[in-house]
Amino acid sequence: MRLITFVGIVLSIFLTVSCGERKTAKGKVYWHSEDGAPTKLDPIESATTYANRITTAVYDTLYEYKYLKRHPYELKPNLAANMPEISEDGLVYTIKIKEGVKFIDDACFKTKENPKGKGREVVAADFVYSLKRHFDPKNSSQGSWLWRGRIVGLDDWGKAAREAGTTDYAAKIKGLQATDKYTIQITLTEPYPQILYTFAMGFASVVPQEAVEKYGKQLTTNPVGSGPFMLKSFNKTKAVLVKNPTYRKEVFDIHYEGYDEEKHGFTGIKALHGKTLPIVDTVIISFMKQDVARWNSLNKGNEIQFGTIPKDQIDNALMSKKPPKVIEKLAKKFHFDYERESGFVFSVFNMTDPAFGYSDDPKRNEMNKALRKAIRKAFDWQGRIDVFYAGIGEPFVGIIPPGISGYSEFPKDSITRDVEGAKKLLKDAGWTAENLPVFEYPNAASTTATQFFEQVRGWLEEIGYPRKKIKQKEFATFGDLNKSMKERKNIINSYGWGLDYPDAENVMQLFYGPNASPGSNASNFDHPEYNELFEKAKPMPDSEERTKLYKRMTEILLEECVGMFGFSRTRLKLWNKNTIMYPTREILSNVFKYVDVIKKDKKKKKNTKADGNGNAGDANNSGDAGQKNTENKE
Amino acid sequence: MTNEQNKQETIKKETLWTKAVRKFFRDKMGVISFSIVCLYALIALGVACGFWATEWSELNPDMKNTGPSADFWLGTNILGQDIYQRAIFSTKTAFEVGLVVALVATMLGAIVGCLSGYFSGTWIDEFFLWIIGCIDCIPFYLFVAAVGFAVNTLAQNLNASFGIEGFEYFAMHIAMIATFWTATARLVRGEVIKIKHLEFVEAAHAIGVPGPKIIFKHILPNTFHILLVQATIAFVSAIKSEVILSYLGLGVKNTVSWGKMIAEATQEVPAGIYSNFFAASAFLFVLVMAFNIFADALQDALDPKKVS
Amino acid sequence: MDTLRYTLRKLLYSVPLILGVTLLSFTLMVYFGPDMAYEKLGKNATEEDIEREREKLGYNKPFVVRYGNFLTSVLTFDFGESFSTNQRVMDMFAETIPVSIMVALPGFILGNLISIIFGLWAAYHRGQRLDKTIMAGAVVGMSISFLIVVIVFQLLLCSDYGLNMFPTTGWEVGMNLEEFNILDYFEYVTVPAICTIFVSVGYNTRFYRAVFVEELTRDHVRTAKAFGCGPVRLLFKHVLKNSLIPILTRIILSLPFVIIGGSIIIESYFGIPGVGSVVYDAIVNGDQPITKAAVVCTAILYVFFLTLTDILYQVVDPRISLK
């Protein structure tokens, strides 16, 4: 067997040598990596960041966030011509869209008059159509909740379609109309200050009806949009985007996008000022779930150009943690940046579970509250962060993460570990090793998830929970775990919440009674005062008054001990020095268009010939074999 | 006449077994590997009785990913747990998985094989062959995964409607049993068809011994040498499959196993952390190796025709 | 003519087998399989939406109706669209099966060839030191877990810590004639192939050795030896040729699994978009159209190859009659 290995090695040395001269993709190629894969690219079902990244690149949204502006994030018009006109009562939005924007050429536009299937112009009615699709009972929309009950007549339209059994897209909806070719008018049922944010999400992408009719469910692999890129291929491990040759003229204005020399100087983005977007011809996105694989690939220098530092590598890769700084060797090869996520990880109890949540018996109710508090005291945030998040960052008190509007300070006792206090709480409430309920920790099967469980088990053992009563409830997939959560079968749910838009309302709705499972309120917390305050704050824009209400609501959550919160993870990003960009995966998604790649002069003549800024036309020829920059190999 | 024949049969059987034992003890490698297996079994027994490796789940937050030391002989993992204790504790898990799967799968295989062979040529035989054929033409890991999930769903239903708990713990065991028994059944069936035509069975028929008694009293014991070998093979396959299944997220629950440790190692090895990997692979490798050699030796000893 | 009639009869007999496989897989994977309704509707669905989604996915229909639908899709060979990606199942298979075959085949072929050579070699020197060394090597190979092999080879050959000669993951190989490049292919297939060979050689060598040993003890071989037949000629002409039946059976019957099953571990660890990982994900997620198609295709291929072996037997050994 050693012989075979040897032969293999010899053979492969020979091969690698000859691979250097391999075909190089034409034009500029940016090779991106993600730690997970999207399943569907139909906008109405593109619920993950992975999917959103692609849908927003191939479709247009009315608005999007400025590329470099953070905290607060700022919207800018994308397909819309400018920011909307909003009526004084905050109910009527009038939005003009850009004129002359075209969908890509596609077979779905083929008619007798248009035998080549030239893409037609994007009109206001396309947006109306795209939003209606979410409420079509034939579709399985994942984003309809964003507008449910918000737009006058839209829900009724869906209901009518359900009852009639057919969907009438021609039917007029009072609150959602195209008043002329380029004007959209939206009427809300009550003020919804966050609605513009929803129009920046992939869910609100503009899809032409022709494409839906032609491709049906296959739209997922045949996107027909007007975005900066077109999808060339897509499978479980890879997606390839190529420049849209008919994309409207868009120029990169770094100052408008929020450029700050101090923050962004190191990236070299300054040089991109005035460039026409998109800059690269091809974007390859590799979906690599395996940390190891991603890390190895990034370190090779000639494969993926962007990656995050995996958990197990952080100790090797960083020379300091506060603030994070990478070691010399990596700093030479890569640009480094870190970013706190717009979201957080937290654990909530299922308040409808009689053993840990509310109980009809007032005495038991108090006992359960004490039990929850004891578990919260056993919870060691620092330990969790040290092991699973490489010791970077600190937990925050309350539920609104710092940096998001509406954040306020609270005393730290809810995130402070106190084993003795926990034991005392249990003892005072009458809990003993015999009468403690079985603690079943649910998770989706993975090594890390098991380690999470083992850590929780360790903490609970320390406060006197018998090991036999702490069990792992393992689900094969996240889907199964999710189902169990939605059916209220778990006693505790630990998960991450990524903000859909940068506003605290998206957080507070997590505990609003009517949102209980299968809605987003996984704790099934249903507290009259909380609900009342939430409703009161709902139509309010971000203001001091609203922050006050949110503060009171958070106090209720802490007092009732709904769970353990929270912590915003810090992502450590590395990207190859030949790539100019400011990568992010928070809130923004249509970012590939800003990326540039420096093509170094190659020794071989034929390679230098491949023109970097090759205009549109030959983008189609760009091979997807990926770029092999041999000179990066040391 | 029948008495005499039975007596003769027993004498013959005894000589077969004593001969096997004698042959086995002549095989040096076989004896060594058998002792290793016994040693592992002892370790597992000790763990089960709570003699050692009791602190395998304890966290030491200040001792993350340390190398070997006086306190932690094989170092610690990311949670600061003692890898030596975990590896030792996993021996119990391995034996539990191996024994349960080997015993049940072999028993099931023996029963089905016997029935099928005894009734060969009838619809009963056809029926069993059909089931075996169906199972054999579904790819192994897909079948195991499917059975694993089905058992999980079933367990939830059982829990919800009858309050039976802990059934899901055996999802992996059941999945493996469901795939492993067919090989035994095929072999036993073949052997039974051979035995069926031997005189003593026909004699038993002649004097009116009922069918089931013939099958289980006279035929089954004569396939014992096959069962023994098949059980050792199933044991090895079970602990090896456990590694893959743990990696795929279908492994054991609430406890630690070599498979789980190796699955952890898939993330750690590239970061230059080898404790989990070495500890678990070494323990696993030695046991599997010993078992493989033991199974070979056993086969040699039990098969008089076997050419070595 | 005989062969044709025999084949037809054999195929007819296989109908119950295929029915059994569909029933088994339906019960396990579809009826007890995961429920996708929640996953399809995202984080903020209403009870009503979920009920409707269940209806759409057919979860509310009785067992018989659902199994009937399953059978219809088997008969028409139309498995519809994947629940989780909306792509047509057959399109997905057409895209992934060639990849799986290309990944698995080199390892499979080489693994068997090497094993046959080792097996012949060991059998010829039966009882001698060489035999013992090869067999000891086989046992060692059998005792190392596949996962460990994959980890070690990837570390040694594909990473910065080792020789770093091959891509870590992926499959950048053109899958049609114009784009296909043999060098790309070698680059991506080498490490998976080495891993496959490493784990299969142990088992295969033992199997083949046993077959050859059996053959070597036969009279005709002894006679040939007595007549001074050289070892190469003896092994290849007399031994190998006469042991073709068990070898062919073993190889052919594992082909369907190579084609449809792929290797889940290899594909998931090396990030290869093959059919193995697609099917595995489908089982895990409850993506029924894919599971159905996979199981049925494997069963059909299995039956096909089973029939093929029977026919091949006759070609290899005319003494076997087709009855």
Image (spheres, grey):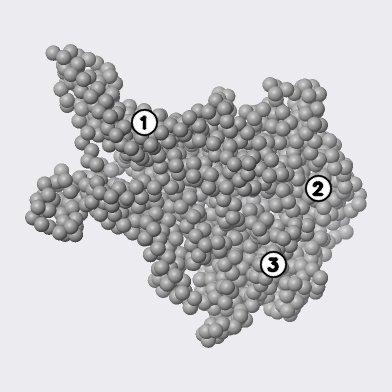
Q: In the rendered structure, which amino acid carries the disc numbered 1?
A: Thr
Measured along the vertical axis of the image, is residue A171 above or below residue A181?
A: above
Q: Chain of mark 1?
A: B
Q: Nearer the viewer, mark 2 or mark 1?
A: 1
- Real-space Cα separation, disc 2 to disc 1, in angstroms: 56 Å
Q: Nearer the viewer, mark 2 or mark 3?
A: 3
- Real-space Cα separation, disc 1 to disc 3, in angstroms: 59 Å
Task: Assess whether mark 3 and mark 2 are in contact (beta carbons under 8 angstroms).
Answer: no
Question: Which one is nearer the viewer's eye here, A384 or B57?
Answer: B57
Q: Residues within 10 Å of mark 3 (few under 14, many from 20)?
A: few
The mark that comes first in sequence, 2 or 3, is: 3
Q: Position of residue A291 (x, y in %)?
A: 59, 56
Residue of label 2: A396
Measured along the vertical axis of the image, is residue C273 above or below residue C142?
A: below
Question: Which one is nearer the viewer's eye here, C84 or B218?
Answer: B218
In this image, B134 relative to C285: left or right? left
Residue of label 1: B106
Q: In the rendered structure, which amino acid carries the disc numbered 3?
A: Glu
In this image, A589 relative to B29: left or right? right
Tell me the element at label 1.
helix
Q: Residues within 10 Å of mark 2 (few under 14, many from 20)?
A: many
Q: Chain of mark 3?
A: A
Tell me the element at label 2.
loop
Q: Position of residue A37 (x, y in %)?
A: 58, 56
**Are the residues under marks 2 and 3 on the same chain?**
yes
Question: Which one is nearer the viewer's eye here, A138 or A111?
Answer: A138
Q: In the rendered structure, which amino acid carries the disc numbered 2?
A: Phe
Task: Assess whether mark 3 and mark 1 are in contact (beta carbons under 8 angstroms).
Answer: no
Tell me the element at label 3.
helix
- Real-space Cα separation, disc 2 to disc 3, in angstroms: 32 Å
Residue A223 visible in the snapshot: no
Return the mark for residue A328. 3
